[in-house]
Amino acid sequence: MRGFMLLLFSMLMGWTVYGQTNSVQGILKDDKNRIVAGATVKLTSKLDSMTTGSNMAGIFIFDKIKSDTFKITVSNLGFERFEKEFSIPKGESKYIIPSLTLQQNSQMLQEVVVDGVPTVVVKSDTLEYTMKDLKLRDGAVAEDALKKLQGVEVDKDGNVTAQGESVKRVRINGKDFFGGDVKTATQNLPANIIQKMQVIDDYGDMANVTGNKNGDSEKVLNIQIDPKYNTGHMTTLRAGVGTEDRYQATGMWMGMREGEQISVLGNLNNTNAPLFDFSTVGGGARRGQGGGGRRGGGMFGGSDGLTKIGSIGLNYRKDFNDKLTVYGSYSFSHSNNTTLSQRFQENTLPNIMQTDSVTSNSNTVGDSHRFEANVEWKPTTKDYIKISPQFGYDKSDATTGTNSLTYRSSVFNNSQAQDIVANSTAPRFGISGLYNHKFNDKGRNVFVNMNFNNAKTTKDQNAILDRLLADPNNANAPLDSIYEKTILEANNKSWNGGASVNYTEPVSEKGKVEFTYDFNKNKYDNSNKQQGFDRDGNLIAEDPKLNFDYNYDYSFTTHKIGANYLYSGDKITYSIGAAAQPSQLRGDAISSGLVVPIHRNNMNWMPIARFEYKFSRQSNISVNYSGTPNEPSVTQILPFDMSTNRTSIVIGNANLNPEFSHQLNVRFRKNDFQKGNNFFAFVNAGLTNNKIVSLSKSYFDDLMDYQTGQTNSTLVSETGYLNETSDKPFNVSSFYHYGKSLKEKTYNIMLMGGVSYNKNIGYVSTEKDDNIGQKNVARNIVLNQGLMFRYNPSENLEINPGVRYQFNHTENSLTNRTTNVSSWTPTLIGSVNITKTTIFGADLSKQFNSGYGAGINANPFVINTYLEQKFLSQQRGTVRLQAFDLLNQQTNVSRTVSESMITDSRTNRLGRYFMILFTYKFQKFAMGNPEGENRFPGGMRPPRM
């Protein structure tokens, strides 16, 4: 009885203690009485362990504190660690701590200060750039600021590269902006409201939540808004008309208040300036699991062809409290693109030189919708939940006309005209979620991640092929012909589902063990039905190559079980372990009652390895390995011909095994920002087991012209697929960048370059029944080198000359043939204030190309220039007269190399026109109206110069 009473008394006391909770609030400042935002604040006691961050006003808040005595610990980059114990006065449940003063870390500042301004802060996986010392003109946008950062490049199409790697996503204040769309943020966000930019090696949500890094990273740009702009709104409107019937109308409105942000963007133009990039994959909780393909977008004047575009989008974010945040976006775009292209293709065949010269004219009209949302919830200090639904819908109507000439051993073989009309729709839906729980502060943790994505594509296609054939034995004989018309209906469905669990157990102060399990399944269910017709519209029922009805469904399932040890020291961080990954490929392909089973089991063993060594705060080297299985695509595995004509055949291989790729990357970074030096380099290497390679055949076959009943010997191209088991294709790529700033960054010199080597393997044949072929090893080496110089004494003058060189070398083992292509591109970009309100700018670029195929080579000299005048009160208005491509020479020339062919391409781009633009800008924030300081942002990006 006594024991029971003691137990009851203890329970009642416990309930009393837990029922009495307190709240604590404080504010952080530095030794110069300035607000410190974004610091990590931790409260600990015998009954409590909580972590939060200081908001933009420097305030931190803790609720439901069980103990009256506690310790506050504050840590933030650039400041000394702060620790102090406090006690809540008796009888009070709410305690306000007097402002806490953080002392700056003098040792760290010595490393990162340039001429007294903290320009760059180096963290483990982050380079943080401060914006306030950049020499930017009034009206600059984020893209203009990026161009002035060491190690960051922005090309003419607006693509951002940081430390030699493409930036894949953009966030604002740590959250995706318009689904992470890079160009939407960099070309629309005003530069003067930005406090700092962070270039991050992002390893996904698990690394962000737990700190445990697995797999490869991707470059992410995080833009931090200056806290003084957190309450207010801004508007930018622009309208322009030009020659060649060119027009542009854009608008942006962004409103912000503490904890809430909304942005509305609109765009209407025929100057190749899309507002959104629908190829960006949404930022769900399980990175890398897409929900279906999306079309990409170009930038002003830089994308192929001529495009009319209308777009509108909405982005919203709401921080309800420290525990709940909701953000998401909706984007819509309507586009109409017309592209003219030329292609010269050299096919690798044994003892025969076969070339194709192709011209095409295509028109594509499409609509794209994208909706993405994210809910982040922290119910307790130990739990974190994120849910991310996504929805998309694409509609496309395309018409393509193609004409080609084929020569074998320099002798004309055939000419071909093909017209294709295709209509397609592609809805998709996905949802992903994650949950993380921290058991204690020592590192015991469980992380659960899951996703589901569903996509469907419906396509109707009409194709007409008209081919004229030469007699290979009599060059003077009349040309025979083959005519085919096909109607195709395709319904393709796919879904992907997966889940993973990661458990971490600390085993020492700096070491912990991680156990992982990952499940993933890709399911495909597709059907294709095609009918063939002659010139009179009669059904050609007797030819199975033109008439087919296929159904095929298969799935690829993987289970990955692994364990590794993670060590995190002051200078050395590494993880080492191993994983086993069994996989199963299972399904059936059905045609006319014939069932072909697809069933394969595989087992892959792989190491888990990552190493990082910090020579100093500004110098480190990292090494990372990752391994990934890849299932065959539908085209590669379907054992039936699904071609739209009888002269270009693709037949898959139901016996294919999945391939497994190994990736190794090494990064080195050494900076001395105090002296203005910046150097980084990386090397990536990849090797693939069971690589799926092509078997390309070119042979003569007897095909009937169903209109005349005549049989003709016709050249047929056929593609099949094999697993390469005797040899291993691999690739190596490298990049380096060295930057030097002189005289308070008035002068900047940048030297960059890299080398890539690719070993591709394929099989070729000139015999119809040869299913083995002759092996060809295609080796491709690409050398890139660039030298850039920037002179920027003030925001009133900037001159950027530079030159780039590229050399592309290819050799094929089967033909012993070597080809070389080279390109020199000098550039000059600059602008100058003629008066305080008048600006002149120009962008000159000349290409010297050599080595391209017949009819492809071009050496365009592109000159863009503008004259801009600011006016109205506080310079809210701007009139710009722009001349684009003055010499009317802009075109795009490129080379692609595969194991069985070399292709040189040339496509049209937006040509010469003149435009006059009017821009009106207005902004108002609670901290005052900065327009009087002539620092109002430019809002929507003006046409590219």
Image (cartoon, helix red, strand yellow):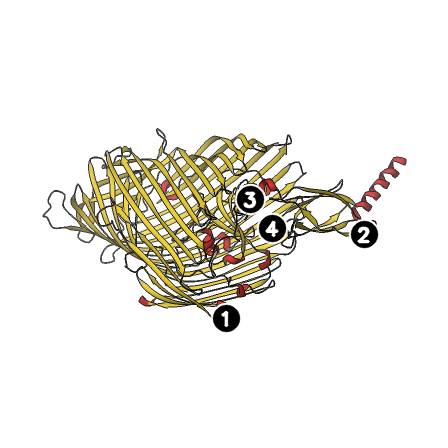
From the viewer's side, name the closer residue of 588 and 267: 267
Lower sequence index among marks 4 and 2: 2
- Is residue 9 visible in the rendered image? The answer is yes
Q: Are marks 4 and 2 in contact (CB under 8 Å)?
A: no
Say which element carries label 1: helix
User: Which label number is shown at residue 376?
Assistant: 4
Gap in Å between the C-alphas at discs 4 and 3? 12 Å
In the picture, measured across the screen, residue 357 lies left or right of residue 379, that is left
Which of label 1 and label 4 is nearer to you?
1
Outermost residue toward the front in this view: 743
Gap in Å between the C-alphas at discs 2 and 1? 54 Å
Outermost residue toward the left in this view: 476
The quadrant of the picture occupied by the N terminus is top right
- Is residue 658 visible in the rendered image? The answer is no
Q: Which residue is mark 2?
A: 92
From the viewer's side, name the closer residue of 492 and 709: 492
